[in-house]
Image (cartoon, coloured by chain):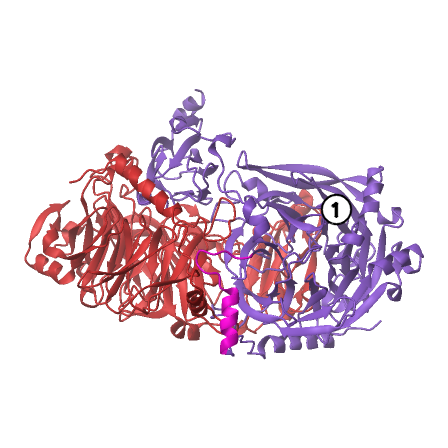
Chain colours: A purple, B red
Amino acid sequence: MKKYSLYLVAILGSVLFLSGCGDQNGKASSNGALASNNAEKVYVAPGEHDEFYAFMSGGYSGNVAVYGLPSGRMFKEIPVFSQFPTNGYGYSEETKPMLETSFGFIPADDSHHPDISQTNGELDGRWLFINGNNTPRIARIDLKTFETAEIIEVPNSAGNHSSSYITENSEYVVAGTRFSVPIPQRDMPIKDYKGNFKGALSFISVEPETGSMDIKFQLIMPGFNYDLSHPGRGKSHGWFFFTTYNTEEANSLLEVNASQNDKDFIAAVNWKKIEEYVENGGGTMVPANYTHNVYSDETHSATSTMKKEVLTVDPTKVPGAIFFMPTPKSPHGVDVNPTGDYIVGNGKLSADLTVFSFDKMIAAIDGKKFDGEAYGLPILKFEDVLAGQVKSGGLGPLHTEFDGQGNAYTTFFISSEVVKWKVGTWEVIDRKPTFYSVGHCMIPGGNSRKPFGKYLVSMNKITKDRYLPTGPELEHSAQLYDISGDKMELIYDFPTHGEPHYAAAIPASILAPKSQKIYKLAENEHPFATKNVSDARIVHDGNEVHVYMAMIRSHFTPDNIEGIKVGDKVYFHITNHEQDFDVPHGFMMIGQKNSGLLIMPGQTKTSVWEPKQEGVWPFYCTDFCSALHQEMQGYVRVSPAKSNIDLSWSLGE
Amino acid sequence: MKKYSLYLVAILGSVLFLSGCGDQNGKASSNGALASNNAEKVYVAPGEHDEFYAFMSGGYSGNVAVYGLPSGRMFKEIPVFSQFPTNGYGYSEETKPMLETSFGFIPADDSHHPDISQTNGELDGRWLFINGNNTPRIARIDLKTFETAEIIEVPNSAGNHSSSYITENSEYVVAGTRFSVPIPQRDMPIKDYKGNFKGALSFISVEPETGSMDIKFQLIMPGFNYDLSHPGRGKSHGWFFFTTYNTEEANSLLEVNASQNDKDFIAAVNWKKIEEYVENGGGTMVPANYTHNVYSDETHSATSTMKKEVLTVDPTKVPGAIFFMPTPKSPHGVDVNPTGDYIVGNGKLSADLTVFSFDKMIAAIDGKKFDGEAYGLPILKFEDVLAGQVKSGGLGPLHTEFDGQGNAYTTFFISSEVVKWKVGTWEVIDRKPTFYSVGHCMIPGGNSRKPFGKYLVSMNKITKDRYLPTGPELEHSAQLYDISGDKMELIYDFPTHGEPHYAAAIPASILAPKSQKIYKLAENEHPFATKNVSDARIVHDGNEVHVYMAMIRSHFTPDNIEGIKVGDKVYFHITNHEQDFDVPHGFMMIGQKNSGLLIMPGQTKTSVWEPKQEGVWPFYCTDFCSALHQEMQGYVRVSPAKSNIDLSWSLGE
């Protein structure tokens, strides 16, 4: 066991600093002809379309941003775990339930690892899954509408980081805890962490037709940090692999104390075996509060349900289901190649990569060749499962992606580069610098049996001088590499919104034809929809007022609203009667305490307004919708509050 | 007077629909050589920088987005009027006061028209001003830090649309009401609008050194809709011009009833005369509640102050200060050319533009040649002030911008095009289609005496098929034209975040050198800063707990926090001790009810956490900050609530 010291930590910090600041090169344009060529490679002319959709997590924005490749243009930000003033997500009555958790309403989170649903190991473009890292959740985005359709909370979890990855027929989206915690949560001294805290790995089933999620079971694992994960595929389908760090089980100063062991583990989980176990009645149902939030396109509304129990599995009760593979130097990413033959461990405090062989792993398991156990779970012998090591010459490997032509690409945070190497021979083929300090990289379909190995995107953690300066706070930055030839070519830099961690990309040819253009008004099942303009009305119910409103170019019905009193609670239920593509209307009301609404054709949304002052107050359409958009406005008259006597009388009506 | 009918409205709708959908061309790439040339024109190679910063309003995002030109890349979203989960703006204790208004805390708005501060009529790059259209406010962004430094509410206003435009020495940022309202606000029937509702035009002084804003005076004008405005410059400096519509003073079905008059007005306001009037004691101070919110870079905190009165001016009391120029067809934009000689009215229900001569206007005023009056304010004769009419051949002119070489560019919403014409001869020189239905256009410095006429950006209201489809809700779209030659060349399409209305752009050579990189820790005056790691501590004050925390790669001090009880209110005051550029740290705590924090080097931010459940709960750094970022975490132990007896005892300490 080699001891890492504070000295090492200091060195790592210095290297980072130097690599981040020292190299001011990387100008793809220094050669005129090359720049011109690269310009043409990334240019998408007006009227033409990008080749790929890239879904990038927003990190601490809590959202997902949709980019085009190769242009690097951001087409959309999809609100997921965060309030989004732009369209009222998390503010409108219909969408507030999406952000309910067992901790209450949570308006923000930290989204990390998107993954696209698969059929037979290939991207099918139906759904995108993404994890909320802070208050543990998994979301499903419907790729017909590009809206968040479902969010399920993950109980017994904390720092939902080794998430959300999909098995090759989308049987499960898998979520692993980064921080171990007392399970069940209870008051105990933090220093008692070791041996007492536990880490939950959650297998969330995905209903094949609807995509609906349910927690099938949680493995209650030793109290390590479960950092990243990836499914097996092809021959290794049925297994799932998780990196661990802090197998030291330190609870303080982790940057020193969690770097003591020379090797942590990759946990190999035979989920098919556990599935069989629980389907035969195995596991223990335990009390656990967690929300399940579902948005309906028919009612244009979300509902939040509190679930009360979850099925837990003690992994020591399922022999043959879980094995640890010792992996050097605090592994971060774990990645599986397209055929499923190899499992790559990226030891972040190392220069080398460790590649395990699935066949060797199975043979070692079959041969019961173990090197002891950890909390009752067998440890395989490093040498027995090792396929090879990539002598990269880089520092700080984090993640590996594959191009489908037998090559792998690994990012190195400290030495700021992407290294291309050959799967099977482990030889390094090429290396290119990144600017600066790359985290994940992504190849479209790189996490499936069929990657589309034309582009690689590096997602860099430090931006510094890559763009015009914008004060102390900068966007993060991505770089686009052409990987169609033997050598990688850096062809473009583009800023990214929030802090993208991972991304998932898919050819436009698969996804674009599925995209929905409007919601049909005739199919609108919102309970407060105004489907005929003649049904627009104002209904008083005590001091609640419901305004059933219709909007179409270029007016609101009604547009003059009287009979409102100070102290009323006014619900504007607004239905957009347009039935053309891309004719939203917006709604804002002066002094509105939530946010505006953006209402798509055929949709109904609700905003609440509680007038505190008498007067005549305007509202208007916020989305420039026609030549007479500026005329699309109205007024609400607010009269003084009823006296107590009037109010009693009114309530008695 | 020509009557517009519902029939016309229907036609306008149809034209819009056809222009939006029918033309599938506009592919700049149909010619290979041309595409290659355009690719090179917009390509900014890795390691190189854009030529211009473009600040685009976010519309209903409530923010400002910063783009580079010619690349069209978004460098940053600056939160202004809206909560922004990404960095905690509007959620952190320090920034919540920025969103306080007389209506209470408002988490969203509708930002429309940015303008950059000027000195001698040229962009000086010190501040960017932007209006909140819904709950009337003006914000000032500091262009050293790219942060919102100040927000002032505008009382007596509603739909703060003819805002925020700057006079040529940044003497005033001007804000005009779009909707007239009762002044003071009071309960009255909406149908009594005509003659009773009023429109406030607010002149907000800008302190020359600090940029600090104060409402110098409000003109209480007739109850029209004040749509857009622009300052005079050069010879017309000292005047301000506002378009009006709904001079009919209709209060319902405005899309019909506000289009009855053949001509509405452009109001010409001699603000120097009014300034003199108020400086000599003119005007009436009236009660008015409005907030003034200021953010300090020293304390890293905002304060909100409620102001109680505002100086109003009855324009009929200041003879010679305000004149109406009749302008055909519901004018939308009003734009002044760089020399200040001409005022262009864009009558949105017209095909032609109306250009007024400043010299003729002065002559007519001097000659007292009036055509009656409106509410006591003189109306100039149309023919007396007319300089010329641009027979554009387009439909639905909205806005005009200038290139500094004697040319003007006008956008046409209905016919979806930009038309270039010659100032002085009024002849049309060129026209190019937009895709689709353009609102504003923008030339860097186009709203100053010194435009940089290399690029024009059109901000289009309908996107439809311009990018890969992303469901029913789409981003808006901009188009970039090279205007350096005689003919405009469409060279790029790029999506824009939110709903950009107007934009302001400035050469990078002016702005980039001013940009600040870090906040100095030594200058941090936050009252709860932890400037020495050894001062990190936990202070209990009844059931309030203040955690004074320091963060530096890669740990929190303290990282194990005990002594917290259910029911406590825990304030995390976190100071980032990094002093290198671009090393933020983030902070999130499981179940946090506000949002995460993003804390820049040298900064202190505060997050509040109210634990509801006992247990041991993690927090972590959300911004990938070093090779040991994943180790940057900590735990809070939450013990059961004190009993009532314990609590009393504790409070009595």
Is A393 or B110 nearer to us in this picture?
A393
Is A197 or B123 nearer to us in this picture?
B123
User: Residue A417: horizontal and vertical position, in percent?
Assistant: 65, 72
Q: Is residue A618 above or below residue B478?
A: above
Q: What residue lies at 36% left-to-right and 63% top-to-bottom? A: B489
Q: Is residue B512 above or below residue A381?
A: below
Residue A444 seen anywhere in this rendered image of the structure = yes
Callout 1 crowding tier (Cα within 10 Å): few <14, some 14–19, many ≥20: many
Q: Which residue is mark 1?
A: A203
Chain for mark 1? Answer: A
Q: In this image, B53 relative to B202: left or right?
A: right
User: Residue A237: horizontal and vertical position, in percent?
Assistant: 78, 51
Q: Is residue A41 above or below residue B225?
A: below
Q: What residue lies at 54% left-to-right and 44% top-to-bottom? A: A145
Is residue A408 within the magenta segment?
no
Q: What residue lies at 14% left-to-right and 54% top-to-bottom? A: B318
Q: Quadrant of residue A584?
A: top left
Residue A250 seen anywhere in this rendered image of the structure = no
- Give the quadrant of the N terminus of chain A: bottom right
What is the three-letter code of the residue carrying label 1?
Answer: Phe
Q: In this image, B395 relative to A35: left or right?
A: left
Is A548 or A517 nearer to us in this picture?
A517
